[in-house]
Amino acid sequence: MLETIVAALEDGKAEDIVTIDLVGKSSIADTMVVASGRSDRHVGAVADRVLRALKEAGHGKAAVEGLQTCDWVLIDAGNVIVHLFRPEVRAFYNLEKMWSSEIPRERAVI
């Protein structure tokens, strides 16, 4: 599934694609993908491309939020969560910094 998503992002000319391993950090998904679009229209077009690629690859219909404004679109594909941003919105939320950091040893679940 991750390969399908990344390929769709690359085909849609998404920028600064980052994958973050969430195993051991959160139970919400195994992987988070963060990428940017140049404008709200570009974010919407890339999100549509990802959704179509997932459906065509047999992964079913993913849940999606944010297509109304396309400042930030979230695609929940189960094991992979995709965040598509306009660059300034991505810089504001800085999800990569929040999710890429290591969990303090005393808070880690064993």
Image (cartoon, grey):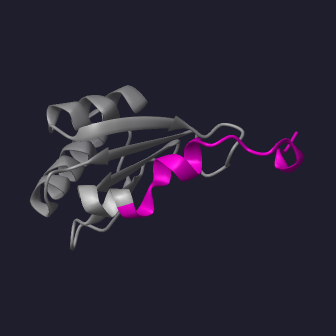
Task: Please report the residue visible at 27 percent of the width from the left and 61 percent of the height from the top.
Answer: 88
Residue 15 or residue 81, whichever sits in front: 15
Instruction: Pinpoint residue 57: horizontal percent, then vertical percent.
Output: 30, 32
Residue toward you, 54 or 47: 47
Report the residue that reaches farthest toward the left.
41
| Above or below for 8 versus 44 | above
Q: Which of 8 and 97 is in front in this view?
A: 97
Determine if the magenta segment contains residue 97: yes
The structure residue drawn at horizontal position 43% and vertical position 62%, both measured from the top left corner, is: 93
Residue drawn at (52%, 48%) of the image: 97
Residue 27 located left or right of residue 90: right
In the shown orientation, is residue 13 left or right of residue 24?
A: left
Indicate the quadrant where residue 12 lies: top left
**Which residue occupies the extreme bottom position in the image?**
68
Q: Is the residue 72 above or below the residue 95 in the image?
A: below
Q: Where is residue 24 in the image (x, y as percent from the top left)?
A: 72, 39
- The quarter of the image holding the C terminus is top right
The N terminus sits in image quarter: top left
Q: How many discs appear?
A: 0
Residue 14 in view in this figure: yes
Tell me if residue 70 comes above or below residue 76 in the rendering. Answer: below
> Is 23 positioned to the left or the right of 82 in the image?
right
Q: Is residue 29 visible?
A: no
Bounds of the magenta segment: 92-110
Q: Measuring from the top left, give residue 67's x and y in whole percent.
A: 24, 66
Residue appearing at x 12%, y 53% in the figure: 42
